[in-house]
Amino acid sequence: MQNVKSFLNSFLEYLQIEKNYSKYTIVSYTKDIEFFLAFMEAEGIETLKQVTYADTRLFLTKLHKEQYSKRSIARKISSLRSFYRYLHREQLVEQNPFALVSLPKKEQKTPRFLYEEELQQVFEVSDLTTPLGQRNQAILELMYATGIRVSECSNIQLQDLELSFQTVLINGKAKKQRYVPFGKYALHALEAYLGDGRLTLLQKGKADTKTLFLNARGGPLTNRGIRLIINKVMEQTADHIRISPHVLRHTFATHMLNHGADLRTIQELLGHENLSTTQIYTHVSKERLKSVYMDAHPRA
């Protein structure tokens, strides 16, 4: 299996250098492929060239017997399909045995989002007379205004902000950049934080930093820090309101769609590579339309 390991290392280098995949994604690919290599060894399959479509069906049977979720199975098959596609491109194998394997249909969960009345309660929690309150409000307003991911929020630098144009440069997945506009509420929250709260927090730090959002010690705020802030805000709102960074992202997309934005625009703002990922929000909109209809129509 020595050649197999070298092929795997070559593929991982390709993902890192040519595809610009994150470390987390590469680790996931590695685990999925190594899992299959262990299956090959158990089945007495010595080389990647020897794997047939029948072997892939046997592999699928093993995954089902071990009660892997549909999502895990789909990810493993997708990883192996990409691996073999690379091997075929490099002429290391003659065919891709995973090319015809059907992925199990994912269970589509309707994204959770907040109604506009619920969202208003979230924006009334922070104490705007304190540096941390100003920071928290700026985070909430900006995340709802732009629909950015928590990792994208923590990575924003001062030079990424264009307050006069009300836009922010976002460094998304796979090092892809996009400009996202934001409205007056986010603008006012950012101006208050930058002109007061951030200056106070910066004085507590040991070194100057250009990261937009700072922690209580004056250093860059991490992904985990933002999640903790949002959890704390959640505890201070009504019991039935449950928010998270991703709920804010879902809320942004749902509200945009409900107020007339087209899917292509929402796709670009969210940084989705495929429109199919964005289309899940049409289900949310339809559910809301149905709910309004049932409540309002006299003969519903």
Image (spheres, grey):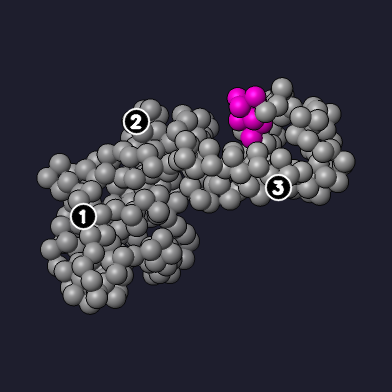
The residue depicted at 71 percent of the width and 40 percent of the height is: 3
Asked if residue 162 lies left or right of residue 14, the reply is left
Q: CA distance from mark 1 to mark 3?
A: 42 Å
The residue depicted at 17 percent of the width and 46 percent of the height is: 162
The residue depicted at 24 percent of the width and 74 percent of the height is: 205
Judging by the rendered image, the residue that carries numbered circle 2 is 265
The image quarter in which residue 63 lies: top right
Q: Position of residue 256 (x, y in %)?
A: 35, 37
The residue depicted at 42 percent of the width and 67 percent of the height is: 228
Q: Which of labels 2 and 1 is toward the front?
A: 1
Residue range in magenta is 83-91
Pointer 1: residues within 10 angstroms few (<14), some, or many (20+)? some
Q: First in sequence, mark 2 or 1: give its number.
A: 1
Q: CA distance from mark 3 to mark 2?
A: 39 Å
Judging by the rendered image, the residue that carries numbered circle 1 is 158
Judging by the rendered image, the residue that carries numbered circle 3 is 34
Whether residue 115 appears in this view of the structure is no
Element type at marker 2?
helix
Image disc number at residue 19: none
The image quarter in which residue 258 lies: top left
The image quarter in which residue 234 lies: bottom left
Q: Amino acid at mark 2?
A: Thr
Foreground: 237 or 67? 67
